[in-house]
Amino acid sequence: MKIDRIPLYQTLEEQRNSKLLIYYTSTRQGLETQIAKDVLPKFSNQLDNIGDTRKITLFLYTNGGDTLAAWSLVNLIRSFCKELEVIIPSNCFSSGTLMCLGANKLIMTKQAALGPIDPSINGPLNPMIPGVPDPHAKVPVSVEYVNAYIEMAKKDFGITDQKNLTEVLLHLSEKIHPLTLGQVYKSKSQIQMIARNLMKYQKINKERTDTIIKFLCSESGSHDYSIRRDEAINSLGLNVEKPTDALYAIIKQIHEDISQELELENSYDPRILLNNVKGQNGYQYSFRRGLIESISCTDVFLSEGTLQMHQDPRTQQLLLNDNRIFEGWKNE
């Protein structure tokens, strides 16, 4: 609960000589959320409460999300401070890693993990998921997987002739819409440009910057690749601070308390929830799926509604009905 975290926030601000902002997106299985543009007004209000200050400490936990939202968020925070540091207690992947590149310094625990920043394209023209009847269920198209397919044709199969490469591309365009492929190319250029602009705050020379961006965008091999603290320091050369035992204890307490509040370790299974409910009213829920918090203000992303089971009159099969009445941010 926040009332238990406030003393920890105050101690952290005193130790870091900064103002603290917390941002969590849910990684709870079945109730995941992502970095999105809807957080910008909430962060703006939080920052207005803080006011202009020398230093802001962002306590960040996320599996990623919208690239441009992450870019806008870093620029918004930096407009209120001269120095930005990011504390990473655990997961900070994809667009979360991109946000970290815009910090002057990262504080990484032993459990902290960054990841590649190569984006995936999600749109109405993406391929449908085979065997899934839902027309809205689409396969995300990874920028680097498209590049890997073309590189495989060249290197592993020795296809270098322009005519044969054209056939490879034509075959690919039969599986993935040409406009989506164009978006893939645009996204790759965009993510590299954004990363380069953000990394100026790390004060790393151009050669090292190019190496880091190349690794994060392609050479890591998989979007699921985890970059731990030692690799971030020794291989990438990012400006990383190892927390003291005292600082680590505070970070761990804050992370564990928020994890418990958002139930990050409990997978979401609506049928189990309904099994524990008697009567016809179903299960009324209010799931906390995101958190933006400072000492003076809290915004929570909520999903609220009722779960019910009903029987299909034709097939007699029991079906789950999720009557969601609210989903969005609320100030507490």
Image: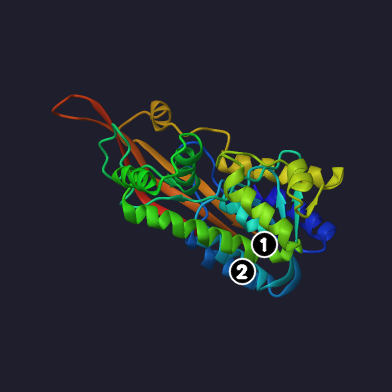
Q: Which residue is mark 2?
A: 75
Question: Residue 129, can we see it?
Answer: yes
Quadrant (top left/top right/bottom left/bottom right) for the C terminus: bottom right
Query: In the depicted view, which residue is nearer to us: 151 or 129?
Result: 151
Q: Quadrant of residue 19?
A: bottom right
Identify the amino acid type marked 2: Asn
Q: CA distance from mark 2 to mark 1?
A: 8 Å
Residue at image location 54% in from the left, 54% down from the top: 300
Mark 1, Cα crowd under 10 Å, few <14 / some 14-19 / many 20+, is many
Residue 109, position in %: x, y?
Answer: 76, 43
Q: Quadrant of residue 98?
A: bottom right
Residue 223, position in %: x, y?
Answer: 55, 42
The mark found on residue 102 in the picture is 1
- State the SS at label 1: loop
**Number of numbered discs:** 2
Image position of 304 with respect to 83: above or below:
above
Residue at image location 73% in from the left, 49% down from the top: 236
Question: In the displayed image of the protein, which residue is found farthest to the left?
Answer: 314
Residue at image location 41% in from the left, 53% down from the top: 327
Question: In the displayed image of the protein, which residue is found farthest to the front?
Answer: 161
Residue 322, position in %: x, y?
Answer: 33, 41
- State the SS at label 2: helix
Instruction: Give the mark nearest the N terminus, 2 or 1.
Output: 2
Query: In the depicted view, which residue is nearer to us: 24 or 218?
Result: 218
Residue 7, position in %: x, y?
Answer: 77, 53
Q: Pointers 2 and 1 in contact (CB under 8 A)? A: yes
Mark 2, Cα crowd under 10 Å, few <14 / some 14-19 / many 20+, is some
Describe residue 160's horizontal placement relative to residue 89 as left or right: left
Q: Quadrant of residue 292?
A: bottom right
Residue at image location 70% in from the left, 66% down from the top: 200
Image position of 241 with respect to 80: above or below:
above
In this picture the colour scheme is rainbow
